[in-house]
Amino acid sequence: MLTVHTDFRSRMYYNQYMRFTKKILAALLSFSLSAGCAPQMVKEVKDGTYTGSSQGYGGTVEVNVTIADQKITEVKVSAPHETQVVASSALKLIPEAIVSSQSIQIDASSGATITSDAICTAVEDALQKADTDMEQWKGGESVSIRNPKKDITTDVVVVGGGIAGLSTALRLQQMGIDTTIIEKDSVCGGIMKDITSAAQIVSSGTKEEKKEEASETEEQPDQEEEDREQSEEETKEEPEPVITLKDDLVPYFTEESGMLEVFMEQLDGTLIWQKNDLGIPFENELIETQPYHEAVVAQYDTSANTVGQLLGKEAEVSGARLLYSTAVIHVEENSDGAVVQAKAADGTLFTVTCTYAVIATGTWDDGEYITICSELNEDDGRKLGGQNGYEYVSGNSILMGTGYQPDDHTVIDLFDDLSGLLKYGGVIVNTDGERFVDETADRQTVSNAILAQQQDCYLVLSTKGYETFRSHLLKMELDGETKDQISSDEGKDVFFITSEQQINDIVPVGRVIQEYEQSLAQLSLNDGYEDAFGRNSFKGNLSIENGIVLIGLSCFSTGNTGGLSVDTSFRVISEDGEASDHVFAVGSVCGNVLSEMDAPGLRTAWAFVSGKTVADEIGSVLAKEQLEKLLAKETEE
């Protein structure tokens, strides 16, 4: 009986306790909800939509603020000049915080502080136009926004995962140096991951130069024979000097940089490394191309992957730390190295402590032409240079003439499709209907010829050829509006010739057809036929009956010849002329090296040469420092 009674009392006390507790919790919850849901103080403001602006990191930030029932209901931000990867979370979170808090007092630590502050200031500017007391929008505690943070310690940070950056990183990893690559895109490779017909200088000597060197290594004659030959030579005219690749390249390098000598010294070793260690395949035959005295340029064999894709895959397995969809915010040097701050698209803030930083961002062009891959390269080299007082050299646009613009904001390089389209007519003409280039030539030759016309130029195709071209475009990663224009045949600068009445509307198509048919006839009579431009392949059929399509060719930019100044060791130079101890630059961001002129295969070769050379320099210095530390330790012991 006693046991049962005690158990009953225990349950009774427990039930009373639970009922009491529930009442307390219910009261607390009710109080909490009533406090949290209490209506915010009604602001005195006129309903409507108001615009405001402020200066951001890269340009003007504009906002549209919508007010309804005396509350901010929406904040739309336009910030096309901000670094999108860095600013993405701020562009999303700051407007949401303003709407939810009904305050412009936002404490943001998003990695894009300047952009965050600019949004708040622009909203304040908009609210002032709504005839309101600004103090009521600033009251209370600040709303705090925090992003996750991560610290990394590494030997070398490479900023940019294009060809130059990947060359640097892969060489460093090959030497056992811990390397971190920071890349804004979701994959590495830069422009070269999309270009399927790139070429590169692959020799430091022309054919004639190598013949001359070979003759010098032959067995030397005896003194008597040498004297006799010398006497005979004195009576002859002096032979013409052998023209070397170095002679050819003089106009393409700036004399003050002294980099032509560095390029020539490092080119052959870089090529051997490309072939043997990176496995980069080249086609067997050299390209006969201007301006070189002898052919020293080869196409990449991209039957499997583009060079950018190949190097991107190498980077994946190299052991390098890869931070994709991440943009550098700041680089700060100190006596021991550098600290690189970066932000990922997911908002993570990275602080990377390193001994050396290598800037391989490429260049941005703000000229009148669309820049290919412009959504990623946002003048990062200039911004990083400005933060640290590095000397920046202004340059001009690097133009290509083989583009097609289906709309005002998209450019596609046609050259990669050109070889496949030649069997469908495939000739390039100017507004007079004149052909002026061998369409089967290398990219730079075709582009230079188009640019030299200084007038509108067109790719002429049969209707079947255009359908093939359109089908390829629709498989590309383009926005929906652009694809709709292409699929509906309403793309910009596409003209359909289907009747005799249209034959001269754009260019004298009749002349083009006549000359094309003559070339076909000549080719059928003579297998070795080459026309005046060197082309020996003509297929397909161009005729009004089957329909002809003209595609207007557009100029586009691949960057700018300007960039950071470097010395002959690729160390970045400050505005006071001092070379950096811990920061290098490679590739096209080196703005004081290559001239305004361009030659086939040169810029690609420069990317590889500069990347490998800097990696070797860093590897040598780190090895020396390590040896000194070991010797010092042994001395102490």
Image (cartoon, grey):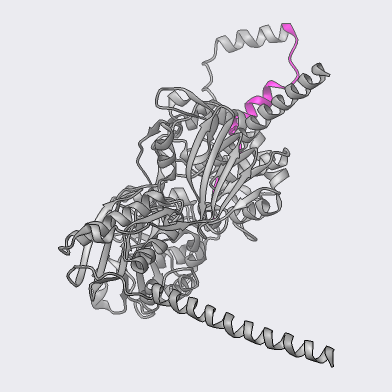
Relative placement, left or right, of 322 versus 526 is right
Q: What stretch is highlighted in magenta?
A: 197-223
Rendered location of residue 594, percent (x, y): 45, 34
Q: Which of 210 and 603 is in front in this view?
A: 603
Residue 636 lies in the magenta stretch: no
Q: Quadrant of the N terminus?
A: bottom right
- Residue 406, image x, y percentages: 36, 67
Residue 100's image quarter? bottom left
**597 or 311: nearer the eye?**
311
Q: Work out whether residue 436 or residue 21 is closer to the camera in this orientation and state it.
A: 21
- Residue that sits furthest to the left in the current view: 131
Is 109 rendered above or below residue 466?
above
Instruction: From the top left corner, tell me how far across and down residue 555 is, in percent.
Output: 35, 54
Query: In this orientation, does residue 534 appear?
Result: yes
Q: Is 3 in front, or is 405?
A: 3
Q: Quadrant of residue 12?
A: bottom right
At a point 68% along the width and 41% down the height, the residue shown is 178
Magenta includes 209?
yes
**Residue under the point 42% across and 54% down:** 108
Residue projecting furthest to the front: 2
Question: Which residue is painted at 61% across and 28% down in the image?
Answer: 265
The reply, left or right, for residue 483 in relation to residue 298 is left
Q: Could one spot residue 201 in this view of the protein?
A: no
- Image quadrant in which the C terminus is located: top right
Q: Position of residue 151 (x, y in %)?
A: 60, 46
With respect to residue 574, does 537 lie above or below? below
Identity of the residue furthest to the bottom in this view: 1
